[in-house]
Image: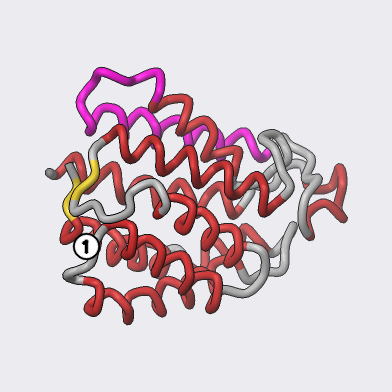
Amino acid sequence: MITTAQAIRIIEEMASIIQQNKDYLTELDMPIGDSDHGINLARGFQAVTTKLPALADKDMGTILKTVGMTLVSTVGGASGPLYGTAFMRASMKVPGKAEVDMVDFMAMLEAAIDGVKIRGKSIPGEKTMLDAMVPAMEALRAAEGQSPAQMLAAAHAAAQVGVEKTKAMVATKGRASYLGERSIGHQDPGATSFTLLLGVVASAVQEG
């Protein structure tokens, strides 16, 4: 179980990991995007952290919806609407809840994936964040029945493999699609940032 207090700490840690990797994510974005993925996400999550104190007594759905709305309104480029949609779709699966379990988490990730597919008009294999999200979801399903820590570790590992696989893909969505075959060899920044965020959740559950 993850309580709302723990969720707020996890979101704070997500902001921290994005800030730490801001330059790395931006470097990944330089050859195939607008050179701003890390900068934009860091700004968005910084804005999120300013909202967290007011969410201390709120339910899980409200917390996630606020994160999503804040990202949409403060993150430029494609990543703001995509991440914002992911969090808002996830929030719709846990309205009024004070804590979530792995069944909830899987429903949230599934909803987030559906939202990203619709918002980005994309499917796995197109060198996007879905290429980390979908393998993570598949790994969660395959690990059902194991401990939450084991399930999330499996999901994080699968997302990392997914990120690696984006290097061999031709981008067909967003700015990267203009490069066509020249996008091969470059790692997708969106898949990378998602994997960093999932790693925060996995670590938090591992540490209890």
**Nearer-the-camera pick, 86 or 200:** 86
- Is 18 one of the magenta-colored residues? no
Query: Where residue 172 sits: x, y (%)?
Result: 81, 45
Majority secondary structure in the magenta region? helix
Magenta residue span: 141-167
Q: Toward which corner of the image does residue 144 lie, by quadrant? A: top left
Query: Where residue 99 sits: x, y (%)?
Result: 19, 49
Q: Label 1: which residue? A: 9
Q: Is residue 121 above or below residue 134?
A: below
Give the position of the N terminus as an image quadrant.
top left
**Nearer-the-camera pick, 157 or 92:** 92
The residue shown at (58%, 67%) is 80
Q: Is residue 61 above or below residue 125?
A: below
The residue shown at (79%, 40%) is 170
Which amino acid does the dot numbered 1 rest on? Answer: Arg
Q: Is residue 30 left or right of residue 129?
A: right
Provide the secondary structure element on which disc 1 rests: helix
The residue shown at (60%, 38%) is 131
- Determine the residue located farthest toward the left in the rendered image: 208
Q: Is residue 20 left or right of residue 151?
A: right
Query: Where residue 117 sits: x, y (%)?
Result: 65, 44
**Nearer-the-camera pick, 63 or 202:** 63
The residue shown at (46%, 65%) is 68
Query: Where residue 21 sits: x, y (%)?
Result: 44, 63
Give the position of the C terminus as an image quadrant.
top left
